[in-house]
Structure formats: C-alpha cells, structure tokens
Amino acid sequence: MNLDTDRHRVLPGIVPDLDAIPADDTGGLEKSAARKELRRLLARLDELQVMMYAQGKHSLLVVLQAMDAGGKDSTIRAVFGPLNPQGVQVTGFKAPSSLELKHDYLWRVHDQCPPRGTIRVFNRSHYEDVLVVRVKSLVPEERWRRRYEQINDFERLVHDEGTTIVKLYLHITKDYQLERFRRRLARPDKHWKFNPNDLVERARWGDYRSAFEEALGRCSKMHAPWYVIPAERRWYRNLLVTRILVDTLEGLNMSYPKPDFDVEQIVLE
Ligand code: AMP
Ligand code: MG
C-alpha cells in the first residue's frame, strides 16, 4: 500500500503551521483497504515487539500529545491493545503531585522511560511542561523557555542509551473538538471523560496551537522525530501511527537472540 509517512514528519528546525495542515487527510486511501492493511501491520508490530522483548536490547518510547478529545485514548487502544501486555506499558501524565513539584519536571518522566525490551507509551508527557505550563503561565517564561533545549538534551540522552523515540501529535481542528465534546455530553458512558474545565482550555485554542507549533518545531530531531498525525479520520490515524511504529522498529534490524545451546543436541522424549 502506498503510504508516505515521511510527509507527516516535522523537519528539524521547521516550525509547522498547524492550521495549514488538513486534519481530515486520508492520504488518498480507501477505508476498507486501509483496515485490511492495518490488520497486517498490527500483526507485524506484534512480531517486532516479541523480537524486542526476546532480544532485550532496545526499547521504544512513544510520546502521544493532542488537544483535548484529540483521540489519544482511542489510539492507544487501537494500536497497542492488540500487543502482548507483558512488553507494553502506558503511562499517563496528569498535573504534577506535590511531591513531583518538589523535583525538576523531568524527574517523573525519566522514571517512566521504558526498560530494555519493552515499549512505553506516554499519554501526555514532558511536553506538557512547555504546553499547559506555558499557556497557563504555571512557571515564569524564562523557565519554560529553557525547557526546549533541556528536553532536547534529555531525549538525546535517552536515545543514546538505547531507547528509540517517536513523538506523535494527533491533529484535530477546533470544530472537530466541539463535535467530540458534544458526543461526550450526549453519552452518559462518556461523561467521565468530560471536564467542564476543558472549555476553559478550548477558549485558549490559539495559545495552545502556538505552543504546540513551537514545541514541534524546536524538538523534532532526526533521532526523536515529531509527526503531525491527521486524526479526524480514525482509520487513517491508526494506519499511519502503526505504519510509523513498524517502520521505526524495522529500522532497528532486530533479530531473535541465538540460543546458547545446540538445538540439534536437544533430545525431547
Ligand atoms: P487527562 O489527560 O484528561 O486526564 O488530563 C490530564 C491533565 O493533566 C490535563 O489537563 C493536563 O494539561 C494536565 N497536566 C499534565 N501534565 C501537566 C504538567 N506538567 N503541568 C500541569 N498540568 C499537567
Ligand atoms: Mg481531559
């Protein structure tokens, strides 16, 4: 299937103009063909995860960020749900606790980075420290300004020590968010996902957009790329995300570890 993931990658140093990127892009693909391809890719991702676990050499960190109702939870369920839970863990980052606030902002993040052989998904991440923190002025500007470089240094360290990093921004429009909020309010089983405070954040959409644009532009690196994932067509979103992860893991050229015994000499009876 002809799927160009590269055009969704943020080139290092280039600040994206999010309003100019269609959030309902489908890459010219058909939903039914995409679904079929997704099943194939999920099976491949499963194989690659088993290999990573068996080899115990590499790890994968997937950072997921989005505006509220951007689809982080449903992406996690669709893409990582089919994998063996033994090798995958999800960490959600909420507003820091009083203990976490006594440490530097990367303390709680570093602690959650994936051990070798495993995949870790960050549902929100250290990027909140240049997003919500910036928009709501939770620390003075001179502090959050320094964080782009600190984050780049941190990710460089984590990468150099054996963790592959992929960062995904699930891209939706303000209109689409309204539609999703309406659905949440129309369904009693979705009320728990709604927080009246989400409307306060929604009112600052433009500030969040600028904060995202700067974070993506300043922190997309060859070794830790940001992708802008058009997320309004969930079947395309799932396909693209899975394809990026498969390509990334295939790039590691992993193999199953060689047995330290002679298979031919083993007698089973
Ligand atoms: P949710 O993902 O809907 O459960 O919401 C988690 C909330 O935690 C969001 O409103 C985030 O903005 C907030 N949050 C996450 N990380 C931070 C942070 N470092 N500082 C302040 N708020 C944060
Ligand atoms: Mg929320």
Image (tube, grey):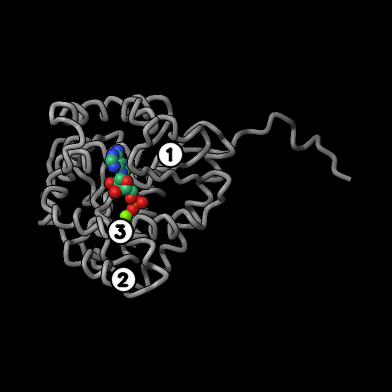
Say which mark, if any, is on residue 60.
1
Q: Earlier in the sequence, mark 2 or mark 1?
A: 1
In which of the image's four quarters is ligand 2 placed?
A: bottom left
At x 32%, y 62%, the residue is: 194
At x 53%, y 36%, the residue is: 117
Q: Quadrant of the N terminus?
A: bottom left
Label 2 – label 1 distance at C-alpha: 35 Å
Badge 3 is on which residue?
A: 195
Q: Examine the rendering and report whether any part of residue 64 can be seen.
A: no
Q: Quadrant of the C terminus?
A: top right
Position of residue 216 measured from the top left corner of the image (x, y, whole percent): 20, 42
At x 50%, y 33%, the residue is: 115
Label 1 – label 3 distance at C-alpha: 31 Å
At mark 1, the secondary structure is strand
Count the labels in the image: 3
> Is mark 1 in CB contact (under 8 Å) with mark 3?
no
Position of residue 40 measured from the top left corner of the image (x, y, whole percent): 46, 61
Q: Nearer the viewer, residue 42 or 167?
A: 167
> Is mark 2 in CB contact (under 8 Å) with mark 3?
no
User: Which amino acid does the dot numbered 2 rest on?
Assistant: Leu
| Ligand 2 within 8 angstroms of badge 3 C-beta | yes
Badge 2 is on which residue?
A: 185
Q: Which mark is nearer the camera, 1 or 3? A: 3
User: Which amino acid does the dot numbered 3 rest on?
Assistant: Asn
Mark 3 Cα within 10 Å, few/some/many (few <14, many 20+)? Answer: few
- 105 vs 250, left or right, is left
At mark 2, the secondary structure is helix
